[in-house]
Image (cartoon, coloured by chain):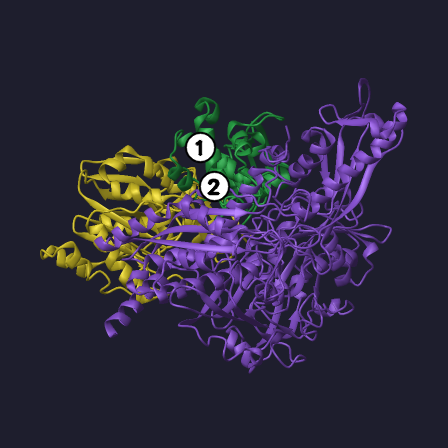
Chain colours: A yellow, B green, C purple
Amino acid sequence: MIPASFDYVAADSTSDAIGLLAEHGDDAKVLAGGHSLLPMMKLRLAQPSVLIDIGRVFELAGITATADELIIGATTRHAALASSELVRADAPLLAHAASLVGDPQIRHRGTIGGSLAHADPAADLPMAVVALGGTLTLSGPSGSRQVPADEFFLGYFETALAEDELLTSVRVPRRPGVPWGYQKFVRRANDWAIVGAAAIAGRVALANMGPMPLRARAAEDALAGGASAAEAARLAAEGTSAPEDIHADRAYREHLARVLTERALEHRSSAAHAG
Amino acid sequence: MRVEFTVNGEPRSADVEPRTLLVHFLREQCGLRAANIGCDTTSCGACTVLLDGESVKSCTVLVAQAAGQEVTTAEGLAPPGELHPVQRAFRAEHGLQCGFCTPGMVMASVSLLAENPHPTEQQVREGLEGNLCRCTGYHNIVRAVLTAAASDPAEVTA
Amino acid sequence: MSILGTRVLRTEDPRFLTTGGVYTEDVTDELLTGACHVFFVRSPVAHAQIGRIDTSAALGAPGVLAVYTGADLAGLPAIDVMMPGLLNERMRRRLLATGKVRFVGDPVAVVVTEHLYQGEDAVELVDVDYDPLPAVVDLDDALHGEVILFDEAGTNVVAEFGNEASLKPDLFDGCEAVVTATIINQRVAPAPMEARAAAAAWGEDGRLTAWIPNQGAQGTREDLAKLLGVEEAQVRVITPDVGGAFGAKFGADPEHAVVAWVARQLGRPARWTESRFENLIAMTHGRGQRHTITIGGSRDGDVQAYRLQIVQDGGAYPKIGAVLPFLTILMAVGPYQIPKAEAIGVSVVTNTTPVGAYRGAGRPEATAALERAFDLFAAEIGMDPAEVRRRNLLPPFTEPHQTAFGALYDSGDYAAALDKALDSAGYAELRAEQARRRASGDPHQLGIGVSCYVEITGGGDGGPPKENATVEVHPDGTATILTGTSPHGQGHSTAWAMIASEELGIPVENFTVRWGDTDLIPEGGGTGGSRSLQQGGAAVQQASRELIDVARERAAAALEASADDLRFNTDRAAFEVAGDPEASVRLADLAKEERLFVHTIFTAPGATFPFGTHVAVAEVDTQTGKATLRRVITVDDAGIVLNPLLAEGQRHGGIAQGAAQAFLEEVVYDADGNPLTASFADYPIVSATELPSFELASMETPTSYNPLGVKGIGEAGTIGATPAVQSAIVDAVGHLGVRHIDMPATPMRIWRAMQAANDGLEGA
């Protein structure tokens, strides 16, 4: 299968990319690694008339640190995120999540910005960034704005990004040594999560329990009130609206959310191969 | 649009439609047909090649994205008539049957060993999660990668 | 030292590893210069009347050469069902659907374009009106026949294999324990890594040359000629490298014929390669049976009666799938001695992808049903499932054994296979570990599954099974083998060369093995049903031996010696005169004056019956329901092993596919007949991460049915592994009251089974 025809234009800077977005409007899609967009285009679920390639904008890639935050450029690839010493030390939950995205080939190409902007509710990085309480930088013609991850994901494949905005970076707090847990429930290692749960510092995020990555707020509140992991986890499915598909119906997803949340709160992490 | 890049050490340039996928360019324009197309969803890995030394699925890379980079395919792993140590190990361990997934599986294995020269069996299995094979049950593919890992590392990652 | 039985590395590998195989899509041939590209427009609805088809927009799209619909092909014959008489003859198909579409994926039109990249754009522009009809997906709906797929047939029943009236009401009289269950042997996708393809060109002589990935060029030629309404002599089929087949590439499909028809219509060569999406909805699926099993016996473990009732989902158009119950019934009692047994079946059509052969085709279903029955019986009487099996296996035999269903088992020692597998697995230790985990309430429970099987290989299609081979020695010392079999991963180039090398003394690397060109090899049965080595390999051996006989006469003349005084020295590939080593002549030299070759046909007395036991160990996370396969241990006795490397490879591949059916793979439709598993993102083809390494124990009980002593090994894995893995998963939660979980044992199914058992216990 091949994509429908489009025009290709490579941006050479962030401002160039933003200018191109303004020029082409909603006919355009931003291409980073292409591992969310190109599969959609091959299936003709997306048919943009212009692709703006930001893969060559060097300032958008790379990981830097301030005193309390890591700043991750939007075109930082999953493999780079997973293997970064800085991320592994200061935001290990994020490095772990990146190491579970897709498969090695996908991790060599796919980018954090692409994954977040694609906003698949079953994906790893959106859940991870919500769990970490990250902040996304969106840049448009009139400047940049900071959007907390909790407010970025608005619905099924829907985000706060305006048509003329580019996701340029993600900031996550540095938390070396803070215990965390990450659970991805899959049938095959490179599948999307049937349900996912990530927990750190009293925050719990869930994947594939609704149209977007969700906070398990009832569980978080219980934790804040002194509940045990097991007690809090029992509330993990509250307020969710889990989808139904060939893998799981809603009741089973809710059950999984409770089990996985408990495990995540116990600071356990699923390896790629385990449930 | 015009793109220039290197394939198996040789400079290539061509005028292509922007939507041209790398795998089609390699197969149709370069005549390099080792990489195969086995799915539509970036799932099977039969089209795996190396882009600047890293495994990628060439069905999900536009030729335009590869501009200026170095592409390596199974044809280019070893001089004609010779086998790369990973290819040799696949033969020694009977890691292929129908051969359709094989070039992609070999390229994924080369990339895996470049990143982790001494993997455990579990790491090999996880490292090949993006490559499907319907014939071997993966048993001998895993053996082949472990065998290749045990040979001279300098040779394997070359 | 004999080369037979040794681990000879494959001679075919270097090119597969470097430049890659030459699959149909890769074929370059003068005849194909300037080929156009064919794309199918497929029905997006499962059951509908086809209304107006508007092709005008597509015809105006860039590069479009033609658009054809069923009306354009009206001159071609309708496709007759295979085995008319057995299958309902009124369920005929057209190459492109006319009147009605009967499954999502049913081709209704083709678009032909100049270039590869133009087709998908144009396909989107073909506008077809569909007037939807209710879809028949459920087997009971199909049987009730409220909605009929083929109005002309008046029923959805394709074939019946016995009937309910023939069942004995007293079959289970006298049994102390009787268990019955209705279980699913789900539909799965063969999913060879290479999807279907074709390239076709008509010569000036009016002959068609067609390159098609297939399992036997000769059968494919026969199908293609029939579909196109031409003489077989007008068709040449060439088999390029084939990227896996698993039973689903036998013969020609409608799409192949359409590509050939387009090439003739446009007067230029045509090519087609399907997408994976098309492959998963339009290549035949496998399995698709519902079983009602009833088993009865004494409380001390003697099975006294067994009944199997099959409903087969044939899909939208009857293909091999509709015949599968025949094979399932043939193998219904497997390796057991069961005094009373009955099996009946019925095949129906549904608005789903047609069902065909998939690795094992009918026999895995028989074993799965029987082994589930044994487990249910063992649980019912509270006996170890391995022990129940041991008590009921047929004793060892070397003279053929006739079953109640007409199968004639050639040789077997089933209990030895069971014991060997249990030993290799460390069965007692596994049970002890299981007991420990149960006692401690470990959230990860261990399950052990045992499956004993016997299967039929090399069965042929009526009459004694046969295959032909030609062996020729060339003056330069090389040799060529022509075979009627058709490898697609099995390694015939290496195996056939080994067999001939053993007789002729020519090194393996000096052989060229050729197959899959009907002009070169007009006859042949292809590769399927695990027939190749026992018939095709035996033919190569026979041809080699006959060639030595021919050569001996020539050598006698050349050396002016009596043929009786000549000894063939395989070390030198030369005849020597006894007592005079100086007087000798090489085989190659004997080919100089006159070509030295033999064409022969090997005929076997019948099918052979390999057997074995598989043991699987699975772990179930009782909190989530997820099963993880930890070990698979198998004994697969397929007679004498020619090349352990190749035989093990066949076992590995089969085990993986068999295990995958047990816990992963399933083709799913919604109630309206929409496929929900039409990509590799949704159809969970098993990957390396879900499987352990396999532990193979060897056992070789020769057959007398061929001089090599070999039986078929290709399908052992899918026959033995599926029930072993399923049983292991059920066993892991057996102590919680779970007796059965349908395949695939997905986490949700396992969790639900635990919930239901728990509710049952609480309610009790």
The residue carrying mark 1 is B146
Front position in the image: C121 or C519: C519
The residue carrying mark 2 is B139
Give the amino acid at mark 2: His
Residue furthest toward the left?
Answer: A226
Mark drawn on residue B63: none
Residue furthest toward the top?
Answer: C582
Residue B36: % across, % down: 58, 43
Give the amino acid at mark 1: Leu
Asked if residue A67 is positioned above or below residue C684 in the image, the reply reads above
Front position in the image: C715 or C583: C583
Residue C762: % across, % down: 23, 71
Q: Chain of mark 2?
A: B
CA–CA distance between discs 1 and 2?
11 Å
Q: What residue is at 42 percent from the left and 60 percent from the top?
A: C388
Residue B62: % across, % down: 52, 43
Q: Earlier in the sequence, mark 1 or mark 2?
A: 2
Front position in the image: A115 or A273: A273
